[in-house]
């Protein structure tokens, strides 16, 4: 089945630093999504991307839908302690298909 | 934004008992609901897709007789873990979607511990 490779697996950064994580796929997706999950909670949608090449921002977060439609990245600028959590990418082939999730990037922010 | 709730938020049960988890879309009608399972430090794994009024579609390797899914209304889907065993202990998360092509919204999850 489809698989997403998400990296890095974990990150430890200083407060104020920028963060970058990415996902690559062996197949094409028509939608890329980025979620954040806090401990004991369900994932919360951060950014949705629908078009190859699309660059979308949500506050300090910026994500891009790769031109090949097989990759996406998420950047977080000027990290703060509340950015701590697990970030998941997810791809969707079409509107009728379920999401395929990456394995997550665990972010720790050191104050 | 759309709100999805799950009940209970956490449950502890004895091995061999059955546990029912509810997923409700509070402010919209969900034609499709998804059930995921997440083990510690793992990603979300899709268990099944349910459409209102029809039988659920299970992913490969998920036993449909063990994980019973009922999507009887447009705002409620239930997952029943029958004859639960310790290896069924996990975090179960639902997602509800208005229509085909729309994004789904995740519930807060249910932590199941089977002793």
Image: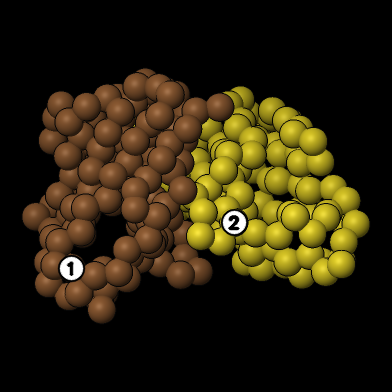
Chain colours: A yellow, B brown
**What residue is at 88 percent from the left and 58 percent from the top?**
A17
Across and down, in percent, residue A46 comes to: 64, 39
Q: How many marks?
A: 2
Residue A24 shows which numbered tag?
Answer: none
Across and down, in percent, residue A104 comes to: 57, 59
Determine the secondary structure under disc 2: loop
- Picture quadrant of residue B102: top left
**What residue is at 85 percent from the left and 48 percent from the top?**
A77
- Taking the image as shown, residue A83 lies to the left or right of residue A23, namely right
- Taking the image as shown, residue B10 lies to the left or right of residue A4, namely left
In the rendered image, which residue does mark 2 sit on?
A: A38
In the rendered image, which residue does mark 1 sit on?
A: B84
Of A31 and A37, nearer the camera is A37
Of A12 and B80, nearer the camera is B80
Q: Is residue A39 visible?
A: yes
What is the chain letter for disc 2? Answer: A
- Taking the image as shown, residue B13 lies to the left or right of residue A7, namely left
Q: CA distance from mark 2 to mark 1?
A: 26 Å
Q: Residues within 10 Å of mark 2 (few under 14, many from 20)?
A: some
Q: Residues within 10 Å of mark 1 (few under 14, many from 20)?
A: many
- Picture quadrant of residue B56: top left
In the rendered image, the residue lying farthest to the left is B65
**What residue is at 69 percent from the left and 46 percent from the top?**
A73
Dot 2 and dot 1 within a common chain: no
Q: From this view, report whether residue A28 is shown above or below residue B83.
A: above
Determine the secondary structure under disc 1: loop
What is the chain letter for disc 1? Answer: B
């Amino acid at each position: 089945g489809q698989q997403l490779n998400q990296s890095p697996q974990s990150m430890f950064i200083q407060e104020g630093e920028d963060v970058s994580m990415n996902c690559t796929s062996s197949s094409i997706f028509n939608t890329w999504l980025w979620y954040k999950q806090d401990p004991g909670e369900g994932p919360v949608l951060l950014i949705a991307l629908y078009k190859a090449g699309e660059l979308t921002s949500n506050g300090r977060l910026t994500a891009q839908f790769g031109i090949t439609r097989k990759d996406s990245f998420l950047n977080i600028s000027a990290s703060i302690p509340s950015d701590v959590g697990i970030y998941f990418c997810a791809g969707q082939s079409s509107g009728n298909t379920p999401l395929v999730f990456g394995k997550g990037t665990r972010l720790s922010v050191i104050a | 934004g759309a709100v999805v709730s799950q009940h209970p938020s956490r449950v502890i049960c004895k091995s061999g008992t059955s546990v029912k988890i509810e997923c409700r879309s509070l402010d919209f009608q969900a034609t499709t609901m998804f059930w995921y399972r997440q083990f510690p430090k793992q990603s979300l794994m899709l268990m099944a897709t349910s459409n209102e009024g029809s039988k659920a579609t299970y992913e490969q390797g998920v036993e449909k007789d063990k994980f019973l899914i009922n999507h009887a209304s447009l705002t409620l889907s239930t997952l029943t873990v029958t004859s639960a065993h310790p290896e069924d202990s996990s975090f179960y998360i639902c997602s509800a979607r208005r229509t085909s092509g729309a994004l789904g919204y995740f519930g807060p999850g249910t932590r199941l511990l089977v002793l």
